[in-house]
Every structure is written in C-alpha cells, then in structure tokens.
Image (cartoon, rainbow, N blue to C red):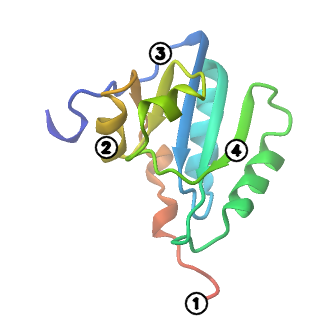
Amino acid sequence: MGRKENVENTLKPHSVSTILFSGRFDPPGASHIATITRLHHEFKRVIVVVLHNKNRRWPADFAVQIFKEVFYWCKNVEIIKNTTHFAEIEKKELDSYGADYYAAGNIRVLKHIAQLMPVVYVDRAYGLSSSRYKDPVQE
C-alpha cells in the first residue's frame, strides 16, 4: 500500500464539516494556496494552522499575513498560529479546534492524528513543494 496506508487519499465533499490543515508553510507557496482553495470548496469551515517555532526560515507571521491577504474573501477560512507541532499534539488540544477532519501532506503527522480523529491526505498540488524553495536571504 506504500506511504498512504490507513489514510484517505482523495477528498470528498463534506459541506457541513470543519477541517484543520496545519503545517510550517515556510515559506507559504502556490501548493499551499491551491490546497487551501480546494479545502475551501469542499468543507464548510477550514482552519489553517501555521506552526510557529524557532526553526523557521521565515517568520510565522509572514505566512499568516500571506494567507490572510490571499483568502480575505473566504469567510469560511480561518488562519491562526500554534506552537505545538501536530506530530506531537495531544487529543485535548486537537479537540479544542472543533474540527471534524484533519488534512495534511505529511504522512508522519497524519499517522499520529489518525489515532485521534479522521484524516484526509492532501497531495502536493501540481507537484510543488515549498520546502524545496531556496531562502533568498542566503543566496
């Protein structure tokens, strides 16, 4: 079954559901925007959680601001920061978001969350990965 075992690998319409989509988004990229757009069309509410920690190349506030500007017109998309990595999040904190589903492209995170709530695997839109971008400050 490969990397996607025990994880839904296609999105289905959930017009009355809330979904969490978390990540570093370091930096936010076209694939993240495409994924959030897709989730926006398929779920009643989308909560995008930007990981805020000291290991970031770009400030978390940068990702939050980008997403807020891009999705200002989406009343069902909420952008927030969190310091807990979702690969280590506990059920009580996860439940505090009030979500029905969790979405990510990180298999390690999905395997952890799948023990706590239903998950949806989201592929890298258009084969893009922001983690492959170079930091322009270091060039």
Q: Which amino acid does label 2 sit on?
A: Ile
The disc, 3 or 2, on the residue closer to the chain's N-terminal end is 3
Circle nearer the N terminus (3, 4): 3
Mark 4 / mark 1, whichever is N-terminal: 4
Front label number (4 vs 1):
4
Position in image of residue 12 (x %, y %): 47, 15
Q: Which mark is residue 12?
A: 3
- Determine the CA span between mark 1 and mark 3: 41 Å
Q: Which of 74 and 127 is in front in this view?
A: 74
Q: In this view, does 71 lie above or below 8?
A: below
Residue visible at 83% across and 49% down in the picture: 69
Placement of the C terminus among the 4 image quadrants? bottom right
Residue underneath mark 4: 80
Q: Where is residue 86 in the image (x, y as percent from the top left)?
A: 45, 45
Q: Separation of disc 2 and disc 4 at Cα?
A: 22 Å
> In which quarter of the view is residue 46 placed?
top right
Amino acid carrying mark 1 in the image: Gln
In the rendered image, the residue lying farthest to the top is 16
Front of the two marks 3 and 2: 2
Neighbour tally class for label 4: few under 14, some 14-19, many 20 plus, Cα within 10 Å = some
Lateral position of residue 118 relative to residue 61, left or right: left
- Whether residues under marks 4 and 1 lie with C-beta atoms below 8 angstroms apart, the answer is no
Q: Residue at x 52, y 18 (%)?
A: 100
Q: Residue tagged by mark 1?
A: 138
Total count of labels: 4
Is 108 placed left or right of 43 in the picture? Answer: left
Asked if labels 4 and 3 touch by Cβ distance under 8 angstroms, the answer is no
Image-quadrant location for residue 113? top left
Q: Which residue is drawn at 69% across and 58% down?
A: 63
Image quadrant of residue 33?
Answer: top right
Q: Which of 27 and 114 is in front in this view?
A: 114
- Residue under label 2: 107
